[in-house]
Image (tube, helix red, strand yellow):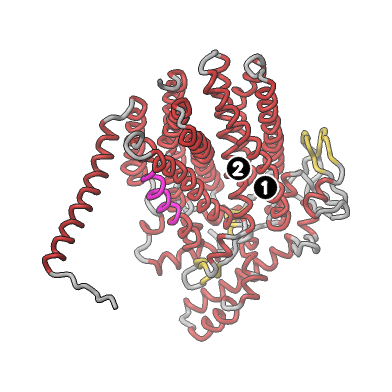
Amino acid sequence: MIENVDLSLVDWSRAQFALTAIYHWLFVPLTLGLSFIVAMMETIYVKTGKEEWKRMTRFWMTLFGINFAIGVATGIILEFEFGTNWSNYSWFVGDIFGAPLAIEGILAFFLESTFVAVMFFGWNKVSKKFHLASTWLVAIGANLSALWILVANAWMQNPVGMTFNPDTARNEMVNFWAVLFNPVAVDKFLHTIFSGFLLASVFVMGISAWFMLKKREEWLTKRSILIAAVFGLLSSLMVAFTGDMSAKTLAKVQPVKFAAMEALYDGSKDAGLVAFGVLKKSDEKILEKKEVKDFAMKIRIPGLLSIMTGGSRDVFVPGIRDLISYGDSVRNILSISEMMQRGLYAKEVLNDYKRAKMLNDKEQAEIIKNEYFGSRTFLEENFRYFGYAFLNSPEDAVPNVPVAFYTFHLMVMLGFFFILVCMIALFLLYRGSLQKNKWFLWVALLSIPLVYICSEAGWVTAEMGRQPWIIQDLMPVSVAVSQISPGAVMTTFILFAVLFTALLAAEVSIMVKQIKTGPKH
Amino acid sequence: MATKQETSPEQFKLLMKEQQKKSSSLASGVIRFYYDGFRTLSEWGKQVWIVILIKLFIIFAILKLFFFPDFLKKNYADDTQRSEYVLDQITKTPDTDD
């Protein structure tokens, strides 16, 4: 099947979605985190009544406003793409994707839009407390909006709480709570919002460091760094903790992705965690087609991967080859070969149903519908592997290992680097020597692009690592794509590249101008 | 024992008038709030609003209309046809694919 799809169409559609999502994600995390930092600053202002705190709040609120305004509606384009480029997917997911997105839209519109206006227009017009409440509600609203998007994304990574209706060819939600409390959704939401808090903290520290290097706004920048460093340190520790939670979940629900993130081809007990590694080509193949990437060099922490996934060094962590041939009996994971058999069977049953309906054989159609699609056993033991029917070989279920490995390790290394940055900032503040240590101020400033790279790398790991699936185990990207002209997709790809680059340039230029102007007196 | 006092039609009318006054003053207050906010926009606020309006125009009036039609809605008349099309797509077998 995969060979029969125009790969240029799939590739362009994927590239377009990736471009849109990456640009969209440049705006989102700063909104998530800076809204809370601003709310904390304003709380101190309301508590102390000192005008300096108000000035500080208004300065960071301006930068928040610029980022918020430029980022608004950039996510809507992703929804357009679902309908145009990924129509089979959009239809197949039914209301499961639509419901969380609709809630997000309503929340974003009413909660954020109303209170954002109070935040910016309400100074001196509403009471201090009402203004403060609005600022907090914007922060909470923005993060709740993210929750619904992440719930929808998590369902794609681990589809739960639904049943398949063969008459409509759609999945239907049967358990809203299972979708909402999907373990992947919980991990993803926490990991993502804390990473947004960290990003905003690094942003505030970086801009404040620039002011310090210019010897401007000493009072304001010291306090900004203090708030950002404390918030950033707590957030970065939570990012590490939720990342660990996420890895444990991944090992169960997306084991191939998990193995690819560690470039683990052959599993073992007492499996080590690769802290740093460089991959190289090798002559070995996974089975027949895909090449095994060997390590040119690596720094490995013995036993840690087994401990992280199962709590003990004796735990067997399966590699890609194990998952293809044997699965993992401890975690009830079937081998990919077995899942392909089950998927093919599910597809055969669906074909029989379609045929019976075409021949108007109502009796036969009813029997298939009741005995198979009405049965939890068939849905859970066969239909959940439906997507494997489209693979030609078990190797097709393996993502691009170097991309998953490098983006994951880049994210982790940068994550630990930011913990260090926050700790050093607090230490230097405590010692009263922050301004003297120019090297650190430069590090803080240069950390701004790094934290964006870190955040994007996390998403690349999540999305590239789950290939070939658009919905894990249920639908590969090659089946999800609409049969439209690759030229049309290419044209819109270029349009988006221009539009988003222009938006980013506008944001950066307006923001830089405001930063240079500095807080108003 | 306390007796329930009934509201006379005149009193009811007065109460309604007061209520209407309150809600219209709330509505005009909100409108004034937004009007003043936009009237006194800072320089960066104006720039940002220009970017927002251009962006929304491009997204909804150009991209959505000309480049992003809903594939299934455009090509198939009703949900039954759409279901049949997607069912065909997801049940194709390698041997029968064209």
The single residue placed furthest to the bottom in the displayed view is A363
State yes or no: discs 2 and 1 in contact (Cβ < 8 Å). Answer: yes
Whether residue A95 sits left or right of residue A120 in the image: it is right
Between the C-alphas of marks 2 and 1, the distance is 9 Å
Residue under circle 2? Answer: A194
Up-down relation of residue A166 to residue A20 (above or below): below
Of the 4 image quadrants, the one containing the C terminus of chain A is top left
Chain bearing mark 1: A
Instruction: Judge by depth and name the residue closer to the eye, A1 or A240.
Output: A240
Q: Chain of mark 2?
A: A
Identified by mark 2, the residue type is Phe
How many residues crowd around disc 1 within 10 Å: few (fewer than 14), some, or many (20 or more)? many
Report the magenta residues as a range. A103-115
Report the amino acid beneath label 1: Thr
Identify which residue is drawn at 20% across, 51% down: B24
Residue B9 pos. (x, y %): 12, 69
Q: Which residue is mark 1?
A: A242
Q: Residue at the location (28% across, 34% down)? A: B38
- Please report the residue visible at 32 percent of the width from the left and 39 percent of the height from the top: B57
